[in-house]
Amino acid sequence: MLKKYGRTFHLPQSPGATSDDKIMSDVGALVAADEVIFTEKMDGENTTIHSDGCHPRSIDARYHSSRDWMKAFAAGISPQLAEDERIVGEYLFARHSIAYSELPTYFLGFAWIKRDVVQPWDATLSRFADLNIAPVPVLYRGLFSEDAVSDVISDLDLSSQEGFVVRVTTAFADKDMPTHLAKYVREGHVQSETHWMSAELVKNGLL
């Protein structure tokens, strides 16, 4: 069965939140965690690989030529996945608001979900290694605090980075995403009034 990846809430201090977005009201689960991981929020298309193929976050999405690469890549991964297993990541073939010139590949994974549980970060990296999937870049690993958030924000280059995602490194049910995972997005992130699917296709660059 196809399953949509859950919505990621914004941290309270995220300047990129719009009226349509959800804001995390309580960061208590992040503060209480023994460890969290901050990863770069990549500017692409949220995509899930499952045992029968792949789909963007909007499961009923129409055909777009930029997705051909993703379908071919998923075809090599899907036979290795169990029916209750999903790999979620950012698909970066088409340029959106940020132009990437040195990507390691066009799909960067950030979650391994098994039986509706988001798996621990270290186990996720091991599964990615098994499947030859590159992970999103890590920005910080340690305790969650206002200082840690401020340090990560200050290290961002907001001309070339969208923001970050922070999550606990332990496993959690995907229904608990609103409390165990959050994002920070730069102000005015979307720079064009034309949606990328309606604009001319421009490929991002690889290393």
Image (spheres, helix red, strand yellow):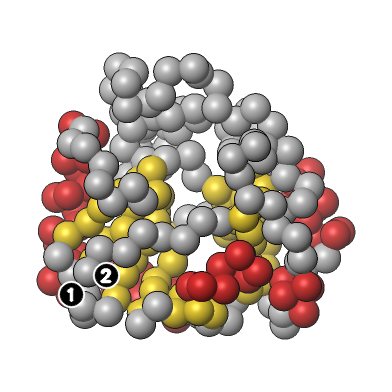
Residue position marked by numbered label 1 in the rendering: 80
Quadrant of the drawing holding the N terminus: bottom left
Quadrant for residue 123, please give it: bottom left
Q: Amino acid at mark 1?
A: Gln
Q: Is residue 203 above or below residue 140?
A: above
Q: Mark number for residue 131? A: 2
Badge 1: few (under 14), some or many (20 or more) residues near its Cα, within 10 Å? few
Q: How many marks?
A: 2
| Badge 1 element | helix
Say if residue 157 shows up in the picture: no
Identify the residue at horizontal 19%, vertical 65% (top origin): 77
Task: Answer whether labels 1 and 2 touch (C-beta < 8 Å).
Answer: yes
Identify the residue at horizontal 58%, vertical 81% (top origin): 170
The residue lying toward the viewer, choosing from 144 and 24, is 24
| Badge 2 element | helix
Say left or right for 25 vs 67.
right
**Marks 1 and 2, the one that precedes in the sequence:** 1
Q: Amino acid at mark 2?
A: Leu
Residue at the outermost front position: 19
Identify the residue at horizontal 31%, vertical 70% (top origin): 86
